[in-house]
Structure formats: C-alpha cells, structure tokens
Amino acid sequence: MLRWTPSGAVAAPTVLQVRVERRYSDRVRAGAPTPSRSLSDEEVASNIHYFAVEQRGPRTRPAQSLVLSGVDPAVRASLAEVVERARGWGMERVILHLTGGEPDRWADLPLVRAVDAVAVTVRRPEEAHALSGLSEHARVSAVVLLEGEGPAPALVDALAVARPARVVLTWPFPPVEAPPVWAIAERLSAAAWALHQRGVAVGIKGIPLCALGELAGFAARSGNRWYVDAEHQREEALMFFPDVVRFSRSEECRFCRAEPHCDGAPERWLRRGLLPALRAR
C-alpha cells in the first residue's frame, strides 16, 4: 500500500509513534516539531483506534505496532489501560521510549509491565548501570548517540555489564550537529566489537553501509512510521520519512546490492560532506 508524499511514493507504515508528553528531554532529536502540549489518555487512545481500526480497508493499511514516546511511567501509569485497549484493537507490539525518573525504579511499574519493550537514551556510565534492574523485567534497547569522538570506553564497559537486549548506536539526525563519520570511526568500531564479543546485540543507525566498512554487518534500518503529537493527530499525522527526517542516496545507490538493507544518509549530512561519497557495494 503506497502513500504519495512530496518525495514520491512511500509504502504506508504499519507502525504508529505517539509523542505523549510535550516535554521530552531524553529524546533523540530528529527534526520533529515540539508540540504545544501533552496528549490526554483519551487522545492517545483515539489516535491508536484511528490507525489500528479505522484504517482497515481496501485502500488503507492498519498499524500493527505502537511506540509511545516521551513517557514517564511513574507519571502516566494510567496509560497501561490504554495499552490494553490497543492490543484489543490489533496492536501486536508496544514499545515505550522512556523519559524522566530512574530506569532501575521503573521495572515494577504497571505501564512498563504492560509493554513488550522499552528504549532508553544513555549518555553516561551511571545511566547504563541503572539499566540492569530494568533489563530483568523488560526487553531494553539502550540508545547511544554518536557524538564527539564516539562512545567513550567507560560507557561501553557499563553497557556490557548492564547487558540490555540491544544497544543502538545512532548517528545524530538533523538538526542536531553530527561529527564526520571518520571522526567517530575508531571508537565506533571499538564499541561495536566490544559489545558484540560480550554477547550484547548491536545495531548502527544513520550511517550507510558503504561508509561502515567492516561494521556493515551491524547496520540497522530505521523503520518508517506514522508520527502523532498534539498538533498532528489522526489524519493530520506526519510520516516520519520524509516529513520529519529526509534520507537521500546517490545515483550509484541504484546499482548497490545492499540497497534493500540501507537507508542512505541524512540529506543534510550528504550536502555537508560529513561522510565519504556513497558507493555501490
């Protein structure tokens, strides 16, 4: 099922992301607008129903996975009931992007227990260590931004000890400033192999396969999704690609055998020359 966008035809997503709270300090910034307010539980439920139930038809494609972002589970405990309703409407997988509080105190909260997985942005070793208790009760993805010179060894060691289900190493999206790929290459390689050797699954996002070299096996695509916030609800929802983030490829990418498994690179970073020219593999 295709949807027409200013960038051409795009497959209609089956994932819905709802930004629940206006304030979301731990998010991985990607150019999404800052909403004027938070969503109520009923607004969250209304949007889930729209994409999971009201989009069932010969010309539409219902969502089957749900991401709730910017959620402090201690504050929005009532969303556990919304998650239960969402499953009844056909949502097969529910993921929380958490903010606020401390991860090791989240494990027993009803909302965390109601979902399939959680994602937490980690920047410091102490934040990584705090994931240990949470990992005992939920499938945890630790998200690490590839800033500066790349992941510090102390952070990598802490993640290896905490053992989340997965560590996602993400090159920053515009408008956040990103370092050139070659500036983070050494630490990125060391981090990916160190975690892999210690039994932690690793995914690298935002960098095209041809620029990853020996790390290409760790490449992970960023799935498209509908994006809802207070100003973009139901039929006004944004499509994450290309409305929020715009990836681009070179003409040579058409002949690359890795093309089905590669996003390309953020258009702005290509224009800025922050990575080598894209080459077919």
Image: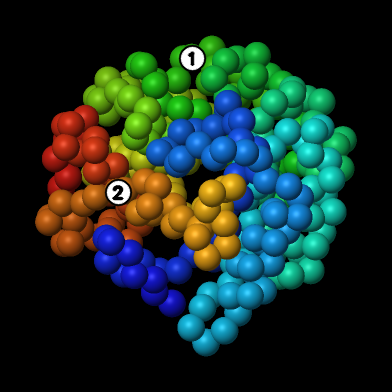
Residue denoted by label 1: 153
Which quarter of the rendered picture does the N terminus lie within? bottom left
Kindly identify the residue that appears in the image at 52 percent across and 53 percent down.
232
Question: Is residue 127 found left or right of 175 in the rendered image?
Answer: right
Kindly identify the residue that appears in the image at 85 percent across and 37 percent down.
109
Q: x%, y% of residue 59?
A: 48, 83
Question: Is residue 134 found left or right of 98 in the rendered image?
Answer: right
Residue denoted by label 2: 247
Quadrant of the rendered image containing residue 73: top right
Q: Residues within 10 Å of mark 1 (few under 14, many from 20)?
A: some
Dot 2 or dot 1: first in sequence order is 1
Q: Nearer the viewer, mark 2 or mark 1?
A: 2
Residue kind at label 1, given as amino acid type:
Pro
Do tag 2 and tag 1 residues touch (Cβ < 8 Å)?
no
Question: Is residue 116 found left or right of 97 in the rendered image?
Answer: right
Helix, strand or loop at label 2? It is strand
